[in-house]
Amino acid sequence: MEANPRKLLDEFIPEAMGKQFVIPVYQRKYTWTINKQLKQLISDLKELIANDNKEHFLGTIIYLETNVNYKTERSIVDGQQRLVTMFLIAAALKSLADNKYRAELISQQYLENMSEPPESKYRQRLYPAVSDEDDYKLVIANRYDELRDKNSNIAKNFLYLQNQLSKLIETYNFDQVLFALKRFTIVYIKLDKHDDAQQIFESINSNGELLTASDLIRNFIMMDKSNHEQTMLYNNYWKILENTFDSSKKMEEFFRFYLASVTNELTEKKNLYTAFKRLYIEQKQQSDDELLLQHIVRYAKYFSMLYYDDLKKPREELEDYRVISSMMPAPFMLAISDLCFHKGSITEEQFYGVMKIINTYLIRRTFAGMDTSRVSRAFPVYLKRVKEIVKTNGYKDIEDIIIYVLANKNRSNKMALPTDKNLESFMMEANAYTMNLTHWLLEKIENHENNAKLDMSSFEVEHIMPQTSTDYWVKQAGVADEDYTNLVNTIGNLTLVTKSDNSAAGNRNFETKKKVFNTTLHIHMNNDLFAMNSWTSKDINERSKKIISILINMFPYLRAKRDYEFKENYKVYLSAQGIYAEGYLNADNSLTIYPGAQLLSSEKINGRVAKIRNDMLNNGDLKEIDGQLILQSRYTSSPSNTAELLLGGSRNGWDYWKSSNNIAIGDDLR
């Protein structure tokens, strides 16, 4: 590694005569903007013009120099923004030169390798990122008028710099401006083949403007490749990802779910890059970059189909899936998509059948008010179970297998599929007006079994009995004033109307409201209201029950036809009071500790636990080694008994034993 200070325009670029600065495709696009960086740069330039003895430090440029076909390339690891900007400044100076000799000199010193023929790719001293290449070519070819129709930062920044430099030259003179520009300095770091460019890049970008995990992933995949290989991988694969996801944040979100779909474990966002790198290195031992990127791109297309694509006539299952607007089942549905659309293991009807099951699970949990914080981590676990079961049972009964995993296996834990009773109990009392899916539910009910479906997306949720209580409405409801607030927001008191009808209805009496509602495009649920003679708490509750009944009918409780015994050992660990042990939870909820586990030593341990330990010492299942009790053979008992053996005294093993996801097994999925 070599590091030195240099004046960027006066030394660093001219010294690279005959060489080419290459912005690798793994780098982010040129992102400097006029307001964020260039206005400040021009301000700094004015200070340099005003003070001939001053210099301004722009930052660091790190590059790796390689020889390709007897040509020298300087691949920029860090600092592309300031380097590209200085090349734009040089191009702007050339356009503003007062004679052709000065313009030619600028080209020779900064912009072109004059020894190369005009058609050579090495003619230009800068080879920009692929995404910026076309507009940079317009700059170099002096086709400035065409730049005005472009929206890239390359085009906008060049025109801005050209304009600002023109004003400065008019105020001062060309030589004075150029002399000031030559006093922008950098420190360059030249890497050699022994330096780990990716590690250095990661260290640099741990400070300042952070890269997203998707940026780091792109760099990791492409950094050790030649420029030719990088360009090929970018054009054939990575560009498809950029076109699919309009921001690096969305791409990062996809990678997180892609990784969960492959590994059956949802990684924390902060650990995403590290987890991806580990998986990629493992997979590359049996594959290559193109095959791995083909796999990623394929999954990206599934993700787009599930969440982004503008489908002309989407299946109802997909419409419902999107309305739920949940990324929680994304890892699961990505894997199911691959089974259907790539491997052909399941049919398209089975695919949508699975989607309907997922919708039912999420919709029921939503309308039963159940906690969703754990659901994101649940779906990779569900996916792992399904994969294990189909190894033995095949894909013929994939829908029944998934029902078994989601419903049957969760009946006794916090991830359970809500029963009809759960739904009715919650929805009868819930504030449905504030629930995200209430509009969708009312529209769904209106269009249920209706051949001529209405587009009610512009309709509004309206209270039949108004939110603001009046003597008239309290009397109508037949409830105490303090009970009015709870009753008014229940699902039975809500309907859909046009915006104009919503305003017209207001707080008016029931007879007037009925007439207003009846004009709203003949909505069936409002026609039913028109037939009512009163609107009491009993009427509201009856309507709530009817709506809940339709919801239950549309998304009925799920029961698997078969019992698919899940036989995978569920690995767990215990770490407390300086003691560490590993084991696994069995299908019958007993727990087995692996040999080598430590046991807490204390004179206070007595009673039943002390007797068990003494018996184990006598028969050799337990040994004292260097003053520490160490388990010598597997020990199986209940989670609480095993925790008591290790720690002494009464312990709730369901809290002490944790899964590999660091979740207490009492809260985790089995």
Image (tube, helix red, strand yellow):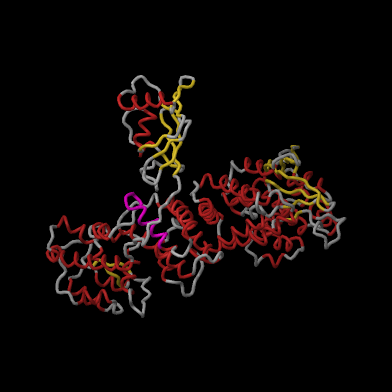
Compare residues 643 and 53 and report the one nearer the observer: 643
Region rendered in magenta: 400-415
Q: Quadrant of residue 408?
A: bottom left
Tell me if I can see residue 249 in this picture: no
Q: Does the magenta stretch include residue 409?
A: yes
Q: Number of marks in the image?
A: 0
Q: In which quarter of the image is residue 480?
A: bottom left
Considering the whole magenta stretch, tell me its main secondary structure.
helix
Q: Quadrant of residue 357?
A: bottom left
Compare residues 183 and 509 and report the one nearer the observer: 509
Q: Residue at x 32, y 50 (%)?
A: 412
Tell me if I can see residue 228 in this picture: yes
Position of 495 relative to 259 (above/below)? below
Where residue 328 appears, x then y in whole percent?
Answer: 44, 55
Compare residues 161 and 478 and report the one nearer the observer: 478
Residue 103 as seen in the image, left or right of residue 325: right
Compare residues 451 and 523 and report the one nearer the observer: 451
Where residue 234 appears, x then y in whole percent?
Answer: 67, 58
Where residue 460 appears, x then y in whole percent?
Answer: 32, 68
Q: Is residue 630 magenta?
A: no
Where residue 229 appears, x then y in whole percent?
Answer: 72, 56
Q: Which residue is drawn at 41% across and 34% down?
A: 635
Position of 636 relative to 521 (above/below)? above
Quadrant of the image containing the N terminus = top right
Q: Which residue is drawn at 70% across and 67% down?
A: 145
